[in-house]
Image: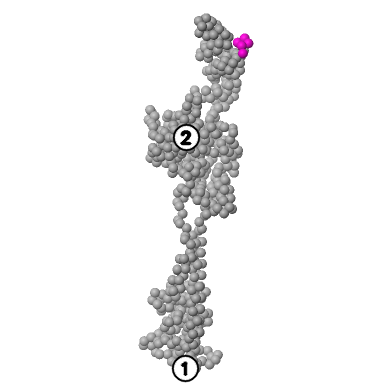
Amino acid sequence: MKIAAGAAVAMAVALPALPAAADTPDERPDVPVGTWLAARTQPAVQLTSFTYTGTVAVPTSTINQTAFNRLVEQATATVSSGKISSDERSIAKWLFQQIAADVDTYLASTTPERTVEAEVGGLCTGWWVTPDGYMVTGAHCVQVGETELSQLFAQQALAKFNRQDAKEIISGLRGLEADEEIVKLAQQIYVTFNTNHMQLRNLKQSLSVVQSLPGGGVDKTAKPVPAELVSVGESYPGKDFALLKVNGQQNLPTVPLGDDSDVRTGDTLYISGFPGLVTNTPFFSLESRLEPALTEGPYNAKRTTQTGVPYIQTQAPSYHGNSGGPVFSKDGKVIGMLIAGTVSENGEASESESFVLPVGIIKEKLGEKNIKPAQTTTTTRYNEALNDFFRHYYSDSLPKFREVQALFPNHPYVAKYISDAQQAISAGKDESPKPILLWVLIGAGVLVAAVIVAVLAKVLRGRGRRRRHSEPSFVQPPAGAVPPPSWRQLPAGQAPPPAQEAYGQAAYGQAAYGQAPYGQAPYGQGVDGRGPVVHNAGGGYGAAPYGSAPDHANPQYGPGPYGYPAPPHGHAQPPSGEQTRAVRYGQFTPPPNDRAS
C-alpha cells in the first residue's frame, strides 16, 4: 500500500501537465480578424472577365456643303457684330464648336465603309458557392446594355478613325496651324459622328474565370476558363445578381453564406475582390494582380431603392473591379456582395459610399435555380490547417495542407503554406502539442521508475534489520489451530520435509499466491514474477504476480525458487503442517542448535 501511494505521489509530481483540449477547428486563432479572413476566403475569390468580340463598321464622312455654307454666313455675321474676333483662329474654333454641337447637320455618310475587328470587356470579382463550379457575381459583370456596349466599342475600335478624320478636317483650314484646343474640337466632332453611325456585326460574348494550372499557384500559368451564364438579374439599382457555372470542377474551395441578421449598423464589414486600379496597372506583376485585396469598414446604414431592393451602405473602400466580390462579417460568413460605389465627376471612387446587395437576395436567387451552397473536405481541411499554422502548430498543419493539395491540385495558396510550415519546423519554431498517448507513456515510465525505487528501498531496509537480529521471529498460530511441533535442525544437504496443509489450504504454494483467501491483488497481473505483493483493502495477501504460484514453488518455506516474496515483516505467518520456519523478506533463518529436537 505504501509503494502504491508513493508511486502515485511521484507520478503526480513528475508527470507534465497534459495539453489542454484542442480548440474547435473553426475557432479563430489569436491573429487579427482581417488576417484570418483573408487567408480563409482568398482561395474561393476569383477574377472574372466578360468579353465581347465583333466587327465594327463606320462610314466615311463628308461635309454637307449646303449646311456648311450657311454656317460660314453665320460666322461672318457674328464677326461683324463683334461677338467673336476677326482672326482666323477664333473663327475656326467657333465653326468647330457649332459642328460638334450638331454633327449630323453638317456631316453626311458616304463610301467607302470602314471596318475593324474589335474586342471589349471588363474584369470583375466572383466567388465559388459550390464545390462543383457554381459561382456568384454581379449582373453588370456579365452583360451590359446596348448603349453602354456601343460606347465601349467606340472607345476601343474608333480611336484610330477619329484621329484620321480630325486630321483631314483640320487640313481644310488653309494652312492655319491648329493648337491643342482646335485639335480636341475636331476629334470630338468625329467621336460623336462615328459613334452615332457605327454598326456592330458578328457580335459574340464570352465569360471566363481566371484559374491557375496544376502546381502553378497564382502566377503566370493562370488562364481563363470558360464559364456558362446560368441566370442573371437586373443591374444596379435592381437585384444585381448573376450565377455562373464552370464545368468539370470538383473539390473547389468555397465560402459559407450567413444571414442578413448577422450584421447591423456599426459592425465591421470586409470586402474581398480585385480592384481595377491594380489589375489594370502594368507596373505590378501578374502574380500580385491575381491576389484579391481585402478592405474593411463599418456598416453605415441599410438603404432601399425606389423599386424596393435593399442595399447596405458601408465605408469599406471599393473600386472598379471589386464588383461581384463577397462581403464578410467578422465570423467569415458572406453577408452580401459588393455592387456599386459612388463615383466622382472625374471618375474616382468615393469612399464611405459602397453599396452591398444583402445575402438574403443572393439566397433567394440561388433558390430559384435550386442551387444549395456547400463545402467539401478541401475547405474544411484548409481551414483546420490554417488554424494550426497560425497557432504555430506547423507539424500538425502539414498533413492537412498536403491533403488539400491532393484534393485540389489547382489550389493557389496551399503550396506556399506547405513551404512556410517546413521552414518554420526547420527553424525550431514548431509548437505542435504532443499526442496524449506520448504523455501517457511518459507518465507510465515515471510510475514504473517510482515503484522500482520503492521496492529497492524496502529490500535494503530488510537487509539492515537481518544484520541486527540473529534470532528468528516466531508467531503464534491462530486461535484454535493445532500448534506446530518444535523445530528440528536439518542435516546439511538434507531436503526439508513436505509441507502439510493447514486450514484446508497450502501455506504458500496455493493459499498465499494461488487462490488468495483474501482476494486478488489490487494491480492484477504482475510482471515476470518480480512485481511486489501489495495488500488489498482487507489486509490479506493478494494474488501472486501471475495469479497463481508456479508448480515448483516450495510451500513450506514461503519463497519459491524464483524469488516469490514472503509476506512482509510484522504480519502473521501462515500455518504449516508439521513444521513452521520463520521467514523474513524472502530469506529463511534456521533455529539455533539448542532448539533442535
Where is 17 relative to 319, above or below?
below
Which secondary structure is most common in the magenta stretch?
Answer: loop
Q: Secondary structure at mark 1?
A: helix
The residue positioned 53% from the left and 91% from the top of the image is: 494
Q: Nearer the viewer, residue 284 or 108?
A: 284
- Residue receiving disc 1: 595
Q: Is 345 left, or right, of 428 in this rendering? A: left
Of the residues shown, which amino acid type is indicated by label 1? Arg
The residue positioned 39% from the left and 34% from the top of the image is: 301
Q: Quadrant of residue 153?
A: top right
Q: Earlier in the sequence, mark 2 or mark 1?
A: 2
Of the residues shown, which amino acid type is indicated by label 2? Pro
Could you tell me residue 295's position as x and y percent?
A: 48, 37
Q: Quadrant of residue 282?
A: top right
Q: Tell me if I can see residue 243 in this picture.
A: no
Distance (Cα) linking label 2 and label 1: 108 Å
Q: Is 177 left, or right, of 478 in this rendering? A: right
Count residues near mark 2 (Cα–Cα under 10 Å), then give few for <14, some for 14-19, many for 20+. some
Could you tell me residue 60's position as x and y percent?
A: 59, 15
Q: Magenta region: which residues?
A: 173-177
Could you tell me residue 164's position as x and y percent?
A: 61, 17
Residue farthest to the right, as pictured? 175
Could you tell me residue 233's position as x and y percent?
A: 44, 31
| Residue 420 among those drawn in magenta | no
Q: Tell me if I can see residue 436 in this picture.
A: yes
The residue positioned 55% from the left and 46% from the top of the image is: 414
